[in-house]
């Protein structure tokens, strides 16, 4: 199971994630988020764990040049687009950063996965290769990290596991509900932010350890 701890703001928390077997850390560059970091901070964090864990940069409606600059400066393994970026934006990223993994986030509510199907069809038409899709809970006016649980059963019923990219589940996941979520959805990976925090934006090492023990044994 690929496990990402997102919204890392301190190097010692990144090292904690590595020590307990996380697959990736997320560096959040959305300035309106309580989990956001600036590039100098991100460089310091990334430098302590690079090569030991996947580095994922999270962007929300950023300029293309800004995303490329961050990706190159940090030697990111993944770019996560969590905003309203069109598929043409993904195409340009793929052209400028060949080899980097692209992760597109979708906010899903009771309406289901219609948008996912539309975007993935457009990706196929434009030759865009997504390494994974992240499914988060839909909360009006928010771009993620809300702590709301995504509709597990609906995702399980509607996600095309055979033909679509790998599924990463997010949205309200905690050490307490993670196994139920995995059993219900059977994702390739999981992504946690608020569920391993003691307060918004403040990661809790004990919760990270508990989460990873419950998944990895």
Image (spheres, grey):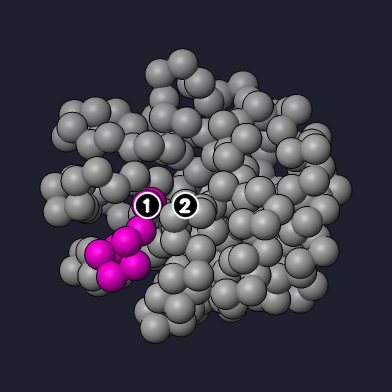
The 10 Å Cα crowd at callout 1, few under 14, some 14 to 19, many 20 or more, is some
Instruction: Indicate the quadrant where residue 81 lies.
Output: bottom left
Q: Is residue 187 above or below residue 69?
A: above
Picture coordinates of residue 200 (x, y %)? 70, 75
The N terminus - image quarter: top right
Q: How crowded is mark 2: few (under 14 residues within 10 Å), some or many (20 or more)?
A: many
The residue tagged 1 is: 77
Q: Give the range drawn in magenta.
A: 71-78
Residue at (14, 54) in percent of width and height = 96
> Residue at the location (71% across, 53% down)?
20
Residue under the point 67% across and 38% down:
151
Q: Are marks 1 and 2 in contact (CB under 8 Å)?
A: yes
User: Would you place residue 190 above or below residue 66 in this image?
Assistant: above
Residue positioned most to the right: 176
Question: Residue 173 lies in magenta, yes or no?
Answer: no
Residue designated by label 2: 54
In this view, 210 is above or below 75: above
């Amino acid at each position: 199971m690929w496990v990402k701890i997102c919204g890392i703001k301190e190097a010692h928390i990144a090292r904690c994630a590595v020590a307990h077997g996380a697959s990736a850390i997320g560096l959040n560059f959305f300035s309106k988020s309580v989990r956001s970091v600036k590039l100098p901070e991100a460089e310091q964090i990334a430098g302590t764990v690079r090569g030991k864990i996947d580095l994922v940069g999270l962007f929300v409606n950023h300029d293309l040049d800004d995303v490329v600059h961050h990706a190159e400066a940090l030697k990111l393994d993944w770019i996560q687009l969590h905003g309203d970026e069109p598929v043409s934006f993904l195409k340009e990223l793929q052209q400028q950063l060949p080899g980097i993994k692209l992760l597109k986030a979708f906010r899903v509510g009771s309406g289901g996965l219609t948008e996912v199907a539309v975007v993935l069809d457009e990706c196929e038409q434009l030759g865009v290769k997504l390494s994974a899709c992240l499914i988060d809970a839909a909360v009006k006016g928010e771009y993620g990290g809300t702590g709301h649980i995504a509709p597990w059963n609906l995702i399980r019923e509607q996600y095309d596991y055979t033909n679509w990219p790998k599924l990463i589940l997010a949205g309200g996941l905690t050490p307490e509900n993670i196994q139920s979520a995995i059993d219900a959805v059977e994702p390739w990976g999981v992504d946690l932010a608020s569920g391993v925090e003691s307060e918004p934006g403040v990661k809790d090492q004990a919760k990270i350890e508990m989460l990873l023990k419950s998944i990895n044994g």
